[in-house]
Amino acid sequence: MDLSGKVAIVTGGAGGLGVAVCRRFAEAGAHVTVVDIAGDVAGIAREVGGIGVVADISTAAGVHAAIAETEARHGRVDVYFSNAGIGDNNGLSSPDVWDDLWRVHVMAHLHASQALLPSMLERGEGYLVSTASGAALTADPISAPYSVTKHAALALAEWLAMTYGNRGIRVSCFCPFAIRTPMLTQAPDDADPAATGVDGAIEPEVAAEILLAGIEAEEFLILSHPEALTYFRGRAHDHAKWLRAMRRLAR
Ligand SMILES: NC(=O)c1ccc[n+]([C@@H]2O[C@H](COP(=O)([O-])OP(=O)(O)OC[C@H]3O[C@@H](n4cnc5c(N)ncnc54)[C@H](O)[C@@H]3O)[C@@H](O)[C@H]2O)c1
């Protein structure tokens, strides 16, 4: 999809990757709505000539507020980039963290899809994009809830693509490995750089460029690091071997 003149919502738009994407989408000619629960939402919105909405996208009400403000200004939403995310470094972690990550990494995408699909299907077009993670293709050895919820995010995107792909709805799932953002710097000091991917981290602007190219080409799976595909194939090809290899990254 060519983003010129398109109406796009970016959640997590005041965070590391989100800011870079808001800027890149605006450069490509999109009308951008910047949505975040924290950060300089108004400042980024001003910079990209768009709308700023402070909202909690883990709730249906927060997602609906962002969509309502965008529709009030532009009459429609062409592209919804469900990108907000939260990190976790605590292994099996606690039920509360599982609940938070489930709501931000999965339910947020569901709320947006349920809110937007009726009008998108009526128009016969619309684009749902989400950020999962390279962890959705392999695993996150540092956090079980991060790993599981990102797998679920990819599964939901696949389900949307196969169910609505013949009815004009495009779906992409961005599965990046490490991007140099505040989330990456939360990794514990004793974590293996190979497990966090810090050593191969790319800048958010580079990730935003890759994402835009993937959207323009309407690719379902958009990868920041080409080796992700090799790991994904390796996991499918010999699952037991992949699992043994992943043990090296266990903390
Ligand atoms: N940085 C990486 O290495 C990396 C790798 C793979 C995937 N990702 C994913 O990329 C996406 C962007 O992360 P980032 O690296 O820019 O991290 P970040 O922490 O810089 O930005 C995340 C943004 O999401 C916002 N957010 C969190 N919960 C929210 C909520 N309930 N409502 C609204 N906004 C909320 C935060 O306020 C923050 O601005 C996330 O989904 C993350 O899981 C990041």
Image (cartoon, grey):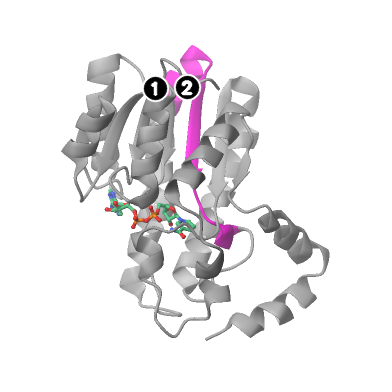
Please determine whether, in this image, residue 117 is positioned above or below residue 173. Answer: above
The answer to whether mark 2 and mark 1 are in CB contact below 8 A is: yes
Q: Tag 1, which secondary structure?
A: loop
Q: Is residue 134 magenta?
A: yes
Please indicate, yes or no, whether residue 44 appears anywhere in the rendered image.
Answer: yes
Q: Is residue 82 magenta?
A: no
The residue tagged 1 is: 30
Which contiguous range is marked in magenta? 117-136
What residue is shown at x 54% (from left), y 46% (from top)?
A: 174
Q: Residue furthest right?
A: 237
Please determine whether, in this image, residue 9 is positioned above or below residue 210. Answer: above
Q: Position of residue 58 (x, y in %)?
A: 31, 50
The quarter of the picture where residue 241 lies is bottom right
Between residues 18 and 145, which one lies in front from this camera angle?
18
Please indicate, yes or no, whether residue 54 appears anywhere in the rendered image.
Answer: no
Image side of residue 49 versus residue 189, left or right:
left
What residue is shown at x 45% (from left), y 17% (from top)?
A: 4
Q: CA distance from mark 2 to mark 1?
A: 5 Å
The disc labelled 1 sits on which kind of residue? Ala
Q: Residues within 10 Å of mark 1 (few under 14, many from 20)?
A: many
The residue tagged 2 is: 3
Please determine whether, in this image, residue 191 is positioned above or below residue 121. Answer: below
Between residues 153 and 181, which one lies in front from this camera angle?
181
What residue is shown at x 29% (from left), y 39% (from top)?
A: 63
